Image (cartoon, rainbow, N blue to C red):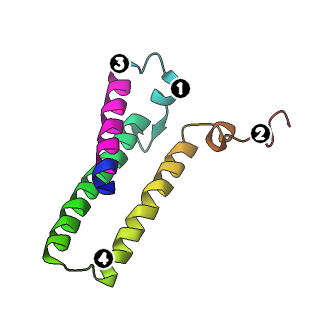
Amino acid sequence: MRAFLICGLSLFAVLWFIFAGLFLSNKLPYISLKIFHNKNMYFWLIIVFAGLAVYELLYALVLTLFLKKKKTFLMVQRFLNALVEISIPTIMVYLSFNVFDSIIKMDSGVGIGIN
């Protein structure tokens, strides 16, 4: 169930970034003007969230199949899942460092007003 929920949220994020990139790019120029490896950030965010949605959907389908057959995942499959589950947030933080100022990213009061 969790995988289907994350898949749905990721698809919503993909639709939001497509909408924002097409219709709000002149209202949100700070993000839309950022270029990362010759593509704007909307492109990369869409790629990351679409990849997460596909991964979670496949994971949910395989998990459902395994539960019906009363099988368990092998250790390699568990490590692969952990690798993906850890890598996606890491990629999101990496992309956010290329878009937002560090004060906005970390959302902390530490260092505000200190120059």
Tell me the quarter of the image containing the C terminus.
top right
The dot on residue 30 is 1
Q: Which numbered disc, 3 or 2, marks the residue that appears first in the sequence?
A: 3
The dot on residue 23 is 3
Q: CA distance from mark 2 to mark 1?
A: 22 Å
Name the amino acid, label 2.
Answer: Gly
Q: Residue at x 28, y 83 (%)?
A: 74
Q: Nearer the viewer, mark 3 or mark 2?
A: 2
Residue 7 x %, y %: 29, 49
47 vs 101, left or right, is left
Question: Circle 4 sits on which residue?
Answer: 77
The reply to whether the magenta stretch includes residue 19 is: yes
Q: Which numbered disc, 4 or 3, marks the residue that appears first in the sequence?
A: 3
Q: Residue at x 54, y 38 (%)?
A: 99
Name the amino acid, label 3.
Answer: Phe
Q: Tell me the crowding category of disc 1: few under 14, some 14 to 19, or many 20 or more residues within 10 angstroms, Cα based.
A: few
Q: Tell me the crowding category of disc 3: few under 14, some 14 to 19, or many 20 or more residues within 10 angstroms, Cα based.
A: few
